[in-house]
Amino acid sequence: MTEMPAYTQVDEALFSGGSAVCAAECHGVLCGILCASGASDIQTWVRHLFETRTTDREISEDSLKLLHDVHQCTLTEINHETLEFKMLMPDPSESMDVRISGLADWCSGFSLGLIMGGLNEQMLLSDDVREFVEDIQYISDASFSEDENDPNQAEKSFTEIEEYVRMGVLLVNEELQPITLEQKPTIH
């Protein structure tokens, strides 16, 4: 199985190629596309990541390989039966404002990815999924406030929201891309 590259590696690959998209948003877009359509054409995804390039530099082969690894790992994780899916987010050692910004960017990317993947209102069957998709919009507007006096409470709250988003993505994926009995592997 391909291992997910580090957040900083993906961020650098995007930046060096002139992308205005950060690693969190990049991964959110991919996950949204996968949830809505069940598949992702890597060329379309990469083209989106670099469509508003800030430089004329070529996108390196190493950067493209790294993005291929993100694509493959995400495809495997989002459909893994043991719920091993992880969001590509800033490291927990980063400051809370960087992490909150990363989560907001991830959610913004996920919303865009759902649209790019063809999500429409008729596809949202359960109230839970509808509510989650609405919540993602609110979380994408999140920002850090210096007013939080208790860093432990801020960490706890952030962790709860991050886990809510992670599990919500799996719920959306399960509802929009259900595995039928024919698709499940037979155990002998």
Image (tube, grey):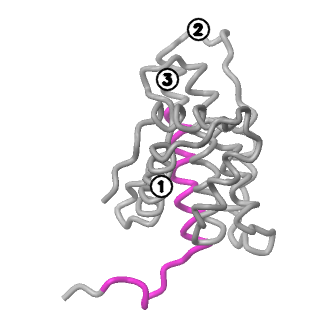
Q: Residue 30 lies in what quarter of the image?
A: bottom right
- Which mark's residue is nearer the viewer, 1 or 3? 1
Q: Amino acid at mark 1?
A: His
Q: Measure how far apart labels 2 and 3 are at the Cα level.
A: 11 Å
Query: Relative to 49, is 54 above or below?
Result: above
Q: Measure how far apart labels 1 and 3 are at the Cα level.
A: 32 Å
Q: Which mark is residue 68?
A: 1
* Location of mark 3 (residue): 155
Residue in the foreground of this view, choosing between 99 and 48: 48
Provide residue 142's location: percent of width, then percent of height: 71, 30
Provide residue 110's location: percent of width, then percent of height: 66, 51
Q: Residue 173 lies in what quarter of the image?
A: bottom right
Q: Amino acid at mark 2?
A: Asn
Task: Please tell me whether the stretch drawn in magenta is mainly helix, strand or loop.
Answer: helix
Provide the secondary structure element on which disc 1 rests: helix
Residue situated furthest left in the rendering: 188
Provide the secondary structure element on which disc 2 rests: loop
Q: Which residues are magenta?
A: 159-185
First along the sequence among labels 1 and 2: 1
Q: Residue 82 lies in what quarter of the image?
A: bottom left
Provide residue 143's location: percent of width, then percent of height: 70, 24
Query: Relative to 55, is 59 above or below?
Result: below
Q: Measure how far apart labels 1 and 2 are at the Cα level.
A: 41 Å
Q: Which mark is residue 149?
A: 2
Horizontal side of residue 97 vs 60, given as left or right: right
Q: Residue at x 61, y 41 (%)?
A: 58
Q: Amino acid at mark 3?
A: Glu
Q: Residue at x 61, y 61 (%)?
A: 43
- Which mark's residue is nearer the viewer, 1 or 2? 1
